[in-house]
Every structure is written in C-alpha cells, then in structure tokens.
Image (spheres, rainbow, N blue to C red):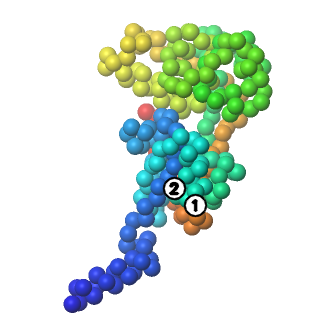
Amino acid sequence: MKDKLGVILLLAAGIFFPGQFFAKQLSIGISFSIPPYVIKDAGTGLELEILREAFKVKGYTVTPVFLPLARTFMHFNQGKTDGVLNVKEGFVDGFYSDEVINFQNCAISLKDNNFNIDTIEDLADKRIVAFQMASKILGTEFGTMAEQNKDYLEIADQSIQLNLLFKERTDVVVMDKRIFNYFKIRAVEALEQGKLAFFQHKDELQKKVQYHCIFPPSRYKFAFITEQIRDDFNLGLRSIKKNGVYDAIFEKYKK
C-alpha cells in the first residue's frame, strides 16, 4: 500500500512539477540541412548540438522536425512545433532567443588569381557560382549585380561550388566560410579513401584561397512557442557559453 501511495505521490508531483521528474520533450522545426550546421542524415550538426546542449541544462530533450521552409514557419505559427531554427525578428509569431549563431558569407577565389574584391561591384566581371537564393538573401546591390552578370549561377548542392572553384571552372564562389571549409575537409578525406572521382590528385584541393568577406554577417536567433521555453533556452545558451561547451562544438566542426 505504501509503495502504491509513493507512486501516486510521484505521479502527482510530476503533474505539478514535470521538469523535476520527467524530461520535457520539444519538437523543433528545421527547414534546411546544410553541413556543418545541420547534418540531417546523421541527426547532428553544429546548430543541433548547440540546441540540444542548451536545452539539456533545463532537462529538455529535442526532436528535430524537418520541413520545407514555408511549412516550417506555418507549423510553428499553428502551434504544431515548439520552436524553429534560424529566424530573424518578424519571421514568425513567437518568443525570440538571444543571438545563437551567425553565418559569414564571403566571395571566395583562388589566391593565385590575385583578385581584388573589396565591394560587390568588383564581382561584376567575374564568373560566379553562389548558393541558392543568394541573389535575394544578400541584399539589393548583390541581386542587381547577379541579374546583370551573364556568368552568374546559383546551385542547391554547395559541395559542387567547391568542385567548380578548385577545377577553375568559375572565378568566385559565394558561400559561408564554415560550409566551404567543411566540404573541403570532407573532400580531402574522400579523396584519400579513393571515394572521390571528381578530383584525381590531392594537390587540386590544396590550392590556397582568398576570402573576400564583403557581406555583413547574417545573425540568427531561434524562436519558441512560449516565453518560458525561450527563457530556459537562453539560460542554457548562456551556461554552455560560460562552461566552454559552446566553443567546443565549434571546434569539433572545424575538423
């Protein structure tokens, strides 16, 4: 009888103080899978690890929900998910976190070409391969340049940008620095294992590059369905920044 009473009391406590007895499950909408930020097949990535580690501080567990961009925002606004990654103020109706991460898009060229690229105007006469939607995301001036440049191309698979640059089939690629470095490291590993047919020699991937970071950083927050979840995430984010976990995650994905 005492055992049953103990179970009942624990269950009651779980109802009124769930965070102390049961992990709190959160579904988080994600609209993209771009290594190293989100690696969908592995269920990991830089941002997913930050998300999980920050919420772990307050006893939450996270389930990623991968959806197309429009549906990610729609599901969140309808209350079907508890949060959404990578939003700027006004994107959704919710409670916005502190800044979590920033993307640094750059124009990247081979150093041997010795290009002077200090402004968007300097790209006008270059062959350019950019990430999908770059002409809309990177501002009006870049969009105008892209529209007028007959050698401008956007592609969805960003690993191909790397291939085209090192094979000298384009002058410049426009992409985030971390994404570029991630794909370069993976390409070298694949080549060493005999799994990469696009390059025949490691030297092709060792060409030095220049980063022309002519775009301002894109700073992103996460959004959550309640103020309490947002506050708990912010507390966890501050905690992992203070204890070194945040920096360790970034170091992990440099390799």
Residue 225 has which mark? 1
The kind of residue tagged 2 is Thr
Looking at the picture, how far across and down is residue 74, in whole percent? Answer: 59, 50
- Left or right: 129 as drawn, with respect to 199: right
In the rendered view of the protein, which quadrant contains the C terminus? Answer: top left
The residue that disc 2 covers is 81
Label 1 sits on a secondary structure element that is loop
Measuring 70% from the left and 31% from the top, which residue is drawn there? 136
Looking at the picture, how far across and down is residue 248, in whole percent? Answer: 46, 45
Label 2 sits on a secondary structure element that is loop
Q: Is residue 97 above or below residue 207?
A: below
For residue 145, which quarter of the picture? top right
Measuring 50% from the left and 16% from the top, which residue is drawn there? 163
For residue 177, which quarter of the picture? top right
The Cα–Cα distance between marks 2 and 1, rounded to whole angstroms, is 8 Å
The kind of residue tagged 1 is Ile
Q: Dot 2 surroundings within 10 Å: few (below 14), some, or many (20 or more)?
A: many
Q: Are the residues at dot 2 and dot 1 in contact (C-beta closer than 8 Å)?
A: yes
